[in-house]
Image (tube, rainbow, N blue to C red):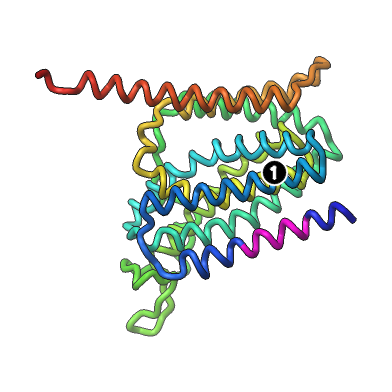
Amino acid sequence: MFSDMMWVAFAVIVVVLLALDLGVFNRKSHVIGVKEALIMSAFWIGIALAFNAVIFWQMGSQSGLEYTAAYVMEKALSVDNLFVFIIIFAFFGIAGEYQHKILFYGIIGALVFRAIFIFAGVTLVEKFDWLLYIFGIFLLITAVKLAVQKDHKMDPDKNIVVRGFRKIMPVSTDSHGGKFFVRTAQGALAATPLFLALLVIETTDIVFAIDSIPAVMGITTDMFIVYTSNVFAILGLRSLYFALAGIMSAMYYLKYGLAVILAFVGVKMLLPIWGYHVDVVVSLAFILSVLLISIVASVIRNKHLKKTKAPAQ
């Protein structure tokens, strides 16, 4: 009964927040500035932390710490999505005032797909606990790939879903005032670049979920903790994008920090084979430390580059 009430309360909170987001805060299409984005980011983080406090209060310190670690890790891993958003919007020529609308509906799709993945993943792990070891190996491989990849290269036009969609429906070259679909002069229904951008965002999020969900399950297999931490991290992703889009390229060492975190979680999932268990407090401290070191190292590198490039007086 208590578990059902927590799920209901969570669902009500998410529905109310999404309604406020679309119907009040962003009722009209507009370019979201850095100041507005920072305020909204603080709002979403505040909501996530308030919910974390409720979990501490109602479910105990262990669940509270698991949520904190899962949320921080999911938030960090979602930074990779920001690079992809930049590429997608640039490729399809999406104006700034329409980007929030696309991301809003992209988030709705992400909530649905991640619910399916998390339910399936947790259910399978509960029946076949050895799957956690498979996830651990998968995360180690992902960590290596992330560390060695040069940059975020992708061609949205080669996306298999987009290519398939173009075969069944014509696509307009104009945004038509922020619409997803329009009627052509011949009366046929056509999609706009906004809808194609949404398709690419949805499909790439599925790819990201394949990495991030096993990582969160390395912290906990409690379905409520896994899903709620994912959702609150995703809900704040749009504001984070508008706040950080201009400085993402400056976070040079962040991807290496994320690779280290994924590798750590992968090893953590494999340690029980030898009878070892990593406490959630240790996991949280490690994740926060690596993120801090990555960011500070990036800032130091940027300052050094500015000095070396500065013209001699």
Count of numbered tags: 1
Residue 305 among those drawn in magenta: no
Task: Give the magenta range.
Answer: 7-16
x, y percent for residue 179: 41, 71
x, y percent for residue 63: 78, 38
> For this view, does 74 lie left or right of residue 292?
right
> For this view, does 210 lie left or right of residue 297?
right
Residue 8 among those drawn in magenta: yes
Judging depth in this view, the residue of 223 and 143 nearest the camera is 223
Work out whether 102 lies above or below 154. Answer: below
> For this view, does 238 lie left or right of residue 117?
left
Residue 161 visible, this orientation: yes
Q: Residue furthest right?
A: 1
Which quarter of the image is occupied by the N terminus? bottom right
x, y percent for residue 265: 66, 26
Q: Residue at x 43, y 73 (%)?
A: 181
SS for dot 1: helix
Work out whether 36 lies above or below 286. Answer: below
Residue 170 visible, this orientation: no
x, y percent for residue 211: 60, 37
Q: Residue at x 73, y 27 (%)?
A: 280
Q: Residue furthest left?
A: 313
Q: Quickly name the residue at label 1.
A: 52
**In the figure, residue 261 lies in which quadrant?**
top right
Q: Residue at x 11, y 18 (%)?
A: 312
Around disc 1, counting alpha carbons within 10 Å, would you say few (fewer than 14), some (14 to 19), or many (20 or more)? many
Q: Residue furthest top?
A: 274
Q: Residue at x 84, y 56 (%)?
A: 4
